[in-house]
Image (cartoon, helix red, strand yellow):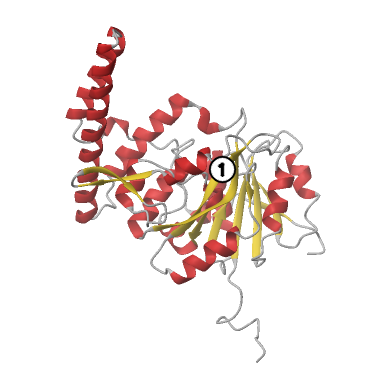
Amino acid sequence: MSERMDDVSVAPLMVSVIVPLFNGGPYIDETLRAILAQTHSTLEVLVVDDGSSDDGPELVRQMLDDPRLSFITKQSLGIAGTRNVGLGIADPRSEFVLFVDHDDVIEPHLVARLLELLTRRTEATAAYAIADFIDGRGDPLDPGGFAAFMRSRRTATRSGMRPVAPTADMTLPEIFLGNRVYPPSGVLMRMSAVRAIGGFDPAYLVADDWDALVKLARLGPLIPVDEVMLSYRRHGNNASMNTGLNVRETRAVWANTYYADANSPADRRRLRAAWRTFQTDTSRRKLTEARSAWRQGRRFGFFRLATDGLAHRVLFAPLRSWRLRPHEPRRTLAEYAALATREQRDAV
């Protein structure tokens, strides 16, 4: 029996792949070739430049002979705004979206595997794969190390923080306490859910993807595929290596989530219970380390750890002062789309 491609019951599902680009010249060719080689080929690939000053844009232009690929220029907006521009101009037929960083490399079957899971699990808002490190040259870096980190999940229970199987659904309380689902290059999201949360919050400089995952988890679970399908490139320019910024934005995610108007009464109860369990667990660990420091004669370490442990014991909720304030008025996705200039081959 023949299949008609215009029959929505059999036509392949459209997936939008959005690639923010900023001075990614050394890596963008490899990143795009991996995307265009996906076994699920019904894609649009939107490379959105954020004011690159290297040869990255020209390298993208040289690949525009693939009709699935578009290059978008705009004013400089930062990573969240750049993702939102791509989201704003994505094909309305797309039911799923993948945000791939310009230096990461996805396996050929990543989209197909995650898409298969999301089409079966209609209540899920996203599905994600396991990642492992590569270095600037593309060679393995600490093989298995980051994959083990992603799999070493814990969640709050009535009896304390407990391990979670790497195949278990990830829900709001777990992703709220800590993010083990990054980079976003391995996360396929349901387009309707991403649009429902308004895209990415530009108040964040590095944690916009974590904040978005928390908001998605309010709407439905995040589903893992316990398989390494993403090479996460580590080099000296990774924004996530800024420790001070990461601490500030971690606190911001906690506070913004905890006090969000979008929380239902059930969400508030779950977040409150998870936070108190997490703080109690952290306090016990710090005080145990303090006692060990005292026995070893490390007086400064003892006082620092003891003070920190006691502070966690009485931190009953995130501080409201941790919340981020927007740098500018929030734009709608349509307003972000209006900022974009699309480039494709004339023949396309």
Q: Which residue is mark 1?
A: 132
Left or right placement of residue 124 versus residue 340 in this view? left
Left or right placement of residue 257 versus residue 239 in this view? left
Q: Residue at x 70, y 44 (%)?
A: 28
Residue closest to the eye, 138 or 80: 138
The residue sitting at the bottom extreme is 1
Helix, strand or loop at mark 1: strand
Give the x, y percent position of residue 262.
Answer: 29, 52
Quarter of the figure that contains the N terminus: bottom right
Give the x, y percent position of residue 217.
Answer: 36, 54
Residue closest to the eye, 327 or 227: 227
Q: Residue at x 73, y 40 (%)?
A: 56
Q: Is residue 17 above or below residue 288?
A: below
Give the total number of marks visible in the rendering: 1
User: Which quadrant holds residue 248?
Assistant: top left
Left or right placement of residue 29 versus residue 155 in this view? right
Give the x, y percent position of residue 85.
Answer: 57, 50
User: Which quadrant holds residue 167?
Assistant: bottom left
Q: Is residue 119 above or below residue 151?
A: below
Quarter of the figure that contains the C terminus: bottom right
